[in-house]
Amino acid sequence: MTIWRLPADEVLFPDPLTAEPDGLIGVDGSISPDHLLAAYREGIFPWNEERERTLWFFTHPRCVLDPARLHVPSSLKPALNRFEVRRDTAFEDVLMGCVTRGAPSPSRRTLRDTWLYPALRASMTTLHRRGVAHSFEAWRDGRLVGGLYGLKIGSVFCGESMYFAERDASKVAFVRMVACARASGITLIDCQQDTEHIRKFGATLIEGADYLAHLRRERDRVVAWAHLG
């Protein structure tokens, strides 16, 4: 088993296809905005519960969603008009919602256990200001009640995390995001983790090599967001 220890002073990642079966490919390195962007351009992302070391993953096979194949569960359809969904109006609030998991008064344990620690949130916010990271937010009666965020790498949207403070809020934000992605020319949504929840929306597994080939082919394409209807 070879797990790379990544340098902090050089933007360098190993071949993603050398990742371990669980996806682990490297440790340490830097979570600066430039390092994060370089990682996502290779399908690699940070994901860990500890602050002491950064763990980098390339999950394979990869769970992805073709925006044209979105399935909206019938149980969710009544909620679609319950929330107003906006894009990029409360990015940092969505990040914090993912940290606290929607709790209005997060416990110290909740904050400690999250992988979205302050330095990583700061880098994500910088990428948001650069037009790379985006949030889709569910609002109700003027209050932010859920949402998700991710990174747009060319025509691939890499979903990162989501949360809800009201039932179905994050699911509605997700559905609206996928519809917007399809209208914008996004070719693939990277769901990273294979879960029963995301499978209900039409996500499937593809080989890691196929995902990486698609990402490398599409990562320099210029794609502008369409109007969020």
Image (cartoon, rainbow, N blue to C red):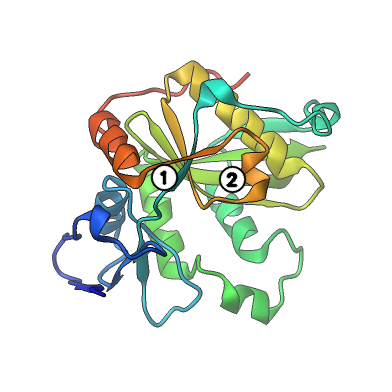
Report the number of numbered marks. Answer: 2
Q: Tell me, yes or no, if residue 34 can be seen here.
A: no
Q: Nearer the viewer, residue 181 or 105?
A: 181
Image quadrant where residue 156 sits: top left
Which type of secondary structure does the marked residue at label 2 adopt?
strand
Horizontal side, residue 2 vs residue 107: left or right: left
The reply, left or right, for residue 117 in relation to residue 179 is left
Rate crowding at label 2 as few (under 14), some (14 to 19) or many (20 or more) other CA atoms within 10 Å: many
Q: Quadrant of the N terminus?
A: bottom left
- For residue 148, the mark is 2
Q: Position of residue 59 (x, y in %)?
A: 40, 55
Q: Residue at x 80, y 25 (%)?
A: 81
Choose mark 2 or mark 1, whichever is in front.
Answer: 2
The amino acid at mark 2 is: Leu
Identity of the residue drawn at 41% across and 25% down:
187
Q: Which residue is mark 1?
A: 128
Residue 146: percent from the left, percent from the top? 70, 46
Q: CA distance from mark 2 to mark 1?
A: 13 Å
Quadrant in the rendering for residue 104 = bottom right
Q: Is residue 73 above or below residue 90?
A: above
Left or right side of 194 for 9 = left
Q: Residue at (71%, 28%) from the top-left corner?
A: 72
Mark earlier in primary sequence (2, 1) = 1
Identified by mark 1, the residue type is His
| Left or right placement of residue 116 versus residue 153 in this view | right
Residue drawn at (46%, 61%) of the image? 121
217 is higher (above) or lower (below) than 31: above
Give residue 32's position: percent from left, percent from top. 29, 62
Label 1 near label 2: C-beta < 8 Å? Answer: no
Dot 1: what SS? helix
The x, y position of residue 152, in whole percent, is: 39, 37
Numbered mark located on residue 136 in the image: none
